[in-house]
Amino acid sequence: MLSTILYGIAVQLTNEITMDSVSVNKFRDNLKSFIEQIVTEHTPLKVTRRSGDDFVVVSADDWEREQETLFVLQNKSLMKQIAASLQSHQQESGYMPTQDEMDEITGI
């Protein structure tokens, strides 16, 4: 695991991405069950082809989440705001909502 500072935020990076892998023939023969697994368990599936051009299948929700994450990570201004917020939180110097505001936020 690699640790780095990104926009003032300590980030733990790992290259231990594990993903199930299946041949395109097995994927085609079991399409319905693989899709159900991908959608319900939120796990991507790597599909391998003899030609060497592999592809990955992910649920639409997971794809959108990944796109949002990439947007945030690529937005320097937003990352700086997050870093400043994290710092003020760690120093307990940031905004503290009232109990009524917390109840409204959490829906209690």
Image: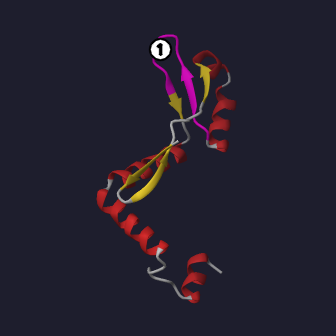
Residue 48: in magenta span? yes
Vertical placement of 40 versus 33: above or below? Answer: below
Q: Residue 89 colored magenta?
A: no
Q: In the current view of this chain or complex, which residue is farthest to the top?
A: 50
Is 40 placed above or below 57 here?
below
Rendering quarter of residue 81:
bottom left
SS under mark 1: loop
Label 1: which residue?
A: 52
Side (left or right) of 88 relative to 39: left
Question: Residue most toward the left?
Answer: 77
Residue 64 horizontal/vertical position (percent): 47, 48
Residue drawn at x 54%, y 88% is 98
**Quadrant placement of the C terminus:** bottom right
Taken as a whole, is the magenta stretch helix, strand or loop? loop
Q: Which residues are magenta?
A: 43-55
The residue at 52%/30% (across/down) is 56
Q: Is residue 50 above or below residue 101?
A: above
x 56%, y 27%: residue = 46
Tag 1: amino acid: Gly
